[in-house]
Amino acid sequence: MPKKKRPSFPFGAEHLLYPDDLPEQKGQLLAGNFLNNILNASHSLTKSVVDSIKSPFTRMALRDEDNALLRKRVDELLLERARYQKLSLKIND
């Protein structure tokens, strides 16, 4: 009876013998990744700086808008109070 062949290496260790089969990163990809990282970092830096400069002004604009709406509402309530006071004076007379 012939002997069964046993693998000489454990399963999954074949890549140690055949490194050419592994995917390699080409030089252009490395340069592309490097440039991509630089562009991403510069974009995030400029966005951060622009947002930190712009955010106080946008908050001020929102506050001004809210203040205008609140002033309008206060005026409406003052007119309504004046109407009720006139009505209460007419009823009391």
Image: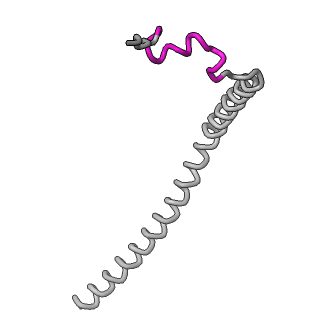
* Residue drawn at (47%, 18%) of the image: 12
* Residue drawn at (40%, 13%) of the image: 4
User: 55 and 2: which one is in front?
Assistant: 2
What is the quadrant of residue 65 in the picture? Answer: bottom right
Q: Which residues are magenta?
A: 8-23
* Residue drawn at (76%, 21%) of the image: 27
Answer above or below: position of 11 versus 85.
Answer: above
Answer above or below: position of 59 versus 30.
Answer: below
What is the quadrant of residue 2 in the picture? Answer: top left
User: 59 and 71: which one is in front?
Assistant: 59
Q: Position of residue 38 (x, y in %)?
A: 71, 26
* Residue drawn at (30%, 87%) of the image: 87
Q: Is residue 91 left or right of residue 73?
A: left
User: 86 and 4: which one is in front?
Assistant: 4
Q: Is residue 55 left or right of residue 74?
A: right
Q: Position of residue 33 (x, y in %)?
A: 70, 27
Indicate the quadrant containing the C terminus: top left, top right, bottom left or bottom right: bottom left
Residue furthest out toward the left? 92
In the rendered structure, does residue 1 fall within the stretch colored magenta?
no
Indicate the quadrant containing the N terminus: top left, top right, bottom left or bottom right: top left
